[in-house]
Image (cartoon, rainbow, N blue to C red):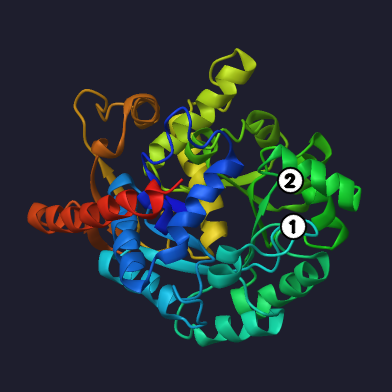
Amino acid sequence: MPNGHSHAFQRALAGAGERSGDAGSFWSWRSLMYRLAADLGPDEMELLATLAYLEMLESGFTSVAEFFYLHHGPDGRPGTAMAEAVVRAARQTGIRLRLVPVYYERGGFGEALDPVQKKRFAHESVEAFVDYVRALSGVPVGLGAHSIRAVAPTSLERLGAMATELGEGLFHIHVAEQVREVEESHRVHGVGPIGLLDQLGLVTPHLQAVHGTHADARERRLLAERGANLILCPVTEAYLADGIFPAAEYVDQGGGWAVGTDANVAIDAVSELRLLEYGQRLSSGKRSNLAGPNGIGARLWQAAARGGARAVGFPVGVLEPGAYADLVMLEDPCLLTGEDPDLDLDAFLIGGSRGTITQVYVGGLRRAGSRGAADQAALRAEAGRLIARLRQGPLSRA
């Protein structure tokens, strides 16, 4: 299973901002996230990414598209040290990384950058961003724009045109995640976020559209008809109270999709798929919305693996000649009998977890299930100390 969308550093936010007086919406949660982003250096970035990537491997993800905008150092100085920390984390754990550097140029529709955005996320120009991407030599990269609220239309057009040259044809962007974003897009541009991307010629098979929660019916059909890929993040979308995407309708239209762990506060591949289906049940009042004649587990895992391969741009997600030998092994006598593989995967989807996964291979090498418990315990202890310091520091400030 490829992970189509990740912000590794947000792993530190698990448990933060959950009291009744804390973050009540995505926008107030974002302020909490910015406090975390303000002071993280390369060492902290590497440790948090290592923890997140190890947990991804343990949960069945073998590749990851890291949607990366924490570019500059804590002092705001440009450079590649933060990105290189993510690359080291991927190499240490063995997960296959597609780094997606993300362009960020404004604080919102007609708004200036706030201090954290300006210091850590934004480049002075598209040209400066391109130079930064080129400096990441030897790293498989895609190309990203944060959102239509954070990047002007003219810049979006330029970035989309550069995606083939710089990002192997991959163009990632957050779209229609929040109602406010959609309303502001209609006010400023007369169309929703996906409608604007269409006007700019960017709704193509290269587009990796993240979330799409509040896209309207026309925009959803447009994604499906143009062959774009939609990256759903059900756990994070629930965590942030974003809403429920009408996935059953979209899948029936032939829309391509993947899943991502986004904020990484709970990393579990099968949980993403289970919550995707359960969200449809809660909104429709019907069971098995995304199932096929042979069940639901195999259908969802295989579809997400195919779509995830598109998101990361590697020959993965299938077991066939020419693809990487990425394998996930399951074992649980209470769930899996081996008598009927489709039924076993239904049981895995409904009752399984990362604990059902015993071994994970990436390119034929065992990357989870073989590491010593002491090594994992030491990493988690070190990461825990860092997260504790963050919770007592920037995450504790009002």
Horizontal side of 343 relative to 209 (left or right) equals: left
Tell me how many marks there are: 2
Horizontal side of 392 relative to 241 (left or right) equals: left
Q: Residue 220: image x %, image y %?
A: 75, 40
Q: Which of 365 and 109 is in front in this view?
A: 109
Labels 1 & 2 near each other (Cβ < 8 A) = yes
Q: Quick one: label 1 or label 2, which is nearer the N terminus? A: 1
Q: What element carries label 1?
A: loop
* Position above or below: 182 against 238: below
Q: Residue 117: image x %, image y %?
A: 59, 65
**Residue receiving disc 1:** 148
User: Residue at 51% across / 24% down in the picture?
Assistant: 278
* Position above or below: 80 against 241: below
- Which of the numbered marks, if any, corresponds to residue 181? 2
Amino acid at pointer 2:
Glu
How packed mark 1 is, by other alpha carbons closer than 10 Å (few <14, some 14-19, many 20 or more), is many
User: Residue at 46% across / 81% down in the picture?
Assistant: 80
Quarter of the image for residue 69 reads: bottom right
Amino acid at pointer 1:
Ile
Q: What element carries label 2?
A: helix
